[in-house]
Image (cartoon, rainbow, N blue to C red):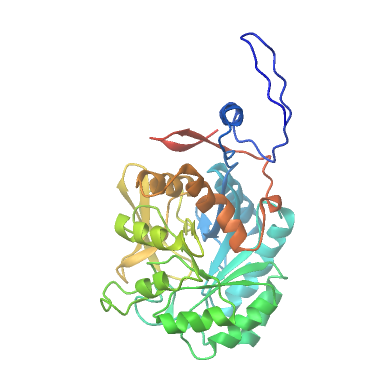
Amino acid sequence: SQSHRFEDGDSVKLQTRVKRVSSGSDIFAWLAHSLTGTSYTMGIPGFVDIQINGWGGVDFSSETLTEEGIENAFDQIVATGTIAFLPTVITSNMSTYQHVLPLLARAVAKRPRTVLGLHLEGPFLDAAPGARGSHRADLIREPDPALLADLLSLANGTVRLLTVAAGRPGVAGLIRAAVEADVTVSLGHQLASLEQLEEAVEAGATILTHLGNGAPNYVNRHHNPFLAGLAAHRLAATLVTDGFHLPKGAVAAAVCVKRGGAGFAVVSDAGYLAGLPAGKYLRSNGVELELVEDHPGAFVIRNPSQQCLSGAAASMLQCANHLWLLNILDAKDELEAAVFSTPLSLLGLTEDAVDCSASCIRWSDERNGYVLQ
């Protein structure tokens, strides 16, 4: 390369090739860093959420789900800054699976660069109180590769992610069957030990579903799912950073451990009540839920009968900004990875799988984080 001295007033023409630009300010920042020889990463175009259960009153696990409802929910999700996501179907009875999975599969086909596939959270979970969370104990099933094959068939090959509980008899065979079907396997809603997690990793599992949640409130101080998950260095972790599901200390511990290992990603785990007014609601399966506004603009879904959380009610935008304001990340690049590139890589995808031209967010400043544009 050759150096050249520029005088004040000289015109300079620069040519470069960039894959995505989220705002004009990114271009100027990139130019400044390029001219000074320092590195700069372009901003992300939006968020990628690999666990979202519904939105605006539309429940992806409801027998009353309709194509119109799905499209409305998808539009609302995108309007919050999430440009790609996995609709998540929780533990259900077979008639519900038979209804929702084909519907959602058709929706995936319509928007393949927005709806990247489906996430099945269950039914192969741990039915123990606390571990199962708000999943119905009577619908949880033992690991069964044949049942899994039926569910994958109903979804017409659109399932990208499966959450199962480690430590259950036969789960290794189930994990191997999922991996052979090109489905990424995550571990959650479990009471698994480190040894059981490692056995699941050997079978092909790569992620921990919402680490720190889907577990009893009271556990052994040394032998518990959270510490086991932290110690399982080959497993990446997803975290619900909405300000309700995990305290700052738990988020900080997970970030500090996983950043040096398999990585971490943010998920919203938003339930179908997200985007609705606070109040009591009755799910189609007869379970009463309550959407609570803890403070202005901050909502969470609770299950009064089980005295537990039943999904979040925050968008990825809110989760990303809450994580940033905890002041535990090393740099903005680390936040961008957690809400965009890492979720994609956990599914074996690159940013080419997403329509990056559909930029819908921008970085405001260090105090406010991301905003919609």
Q: Position of residue 67 (x, y in %)?
A: 66, 57
Q: Position of residue 307 (x, y in %)?
A: 29, 68
115 or 57: nearer the eye?
115
Q: Quadrant of the C terminus?
A: top right
Res. 94 in view: yes
Q: Which residue ends up furthest to the bottom in the rendered image? A: 169
Q: Position of residue 17 (x, y in %)?
A: 73, 36
Q: Quadrant of residue 250?
A: bottom left
Q: Residue at x 48, y 45 (%)?
A: 317
Q: Is residue 59 left or right of residue 110?
A: left
Report the number of discs: 0
Q: Which residue ends up furthest to the front in the rendered image? A: 2
Q: Residue at x 34, y 79 (%)?
A: 129
251 or 121: nearer the eye?
251
Q: Residue at x 71, y 50 (%)?
A: 352
Q: Position of residue 167 (x, y in %)?
A: 46, 85
Q: Residue at x 39, y 80 (%)?
A: 191
Q: Is residue 355 left or right of residue 92?
A: right
Q: Quadrant of residue 34?
A: top right
Residue 70, compared with residue 153, is above or below; it is: above
Res. 140 in view: no
Q: Is residue 63 left or right of residue 297?
A: right
Q: Quadrant of the N terminus?
A: top right
311 or 197: nearer the eye?
197
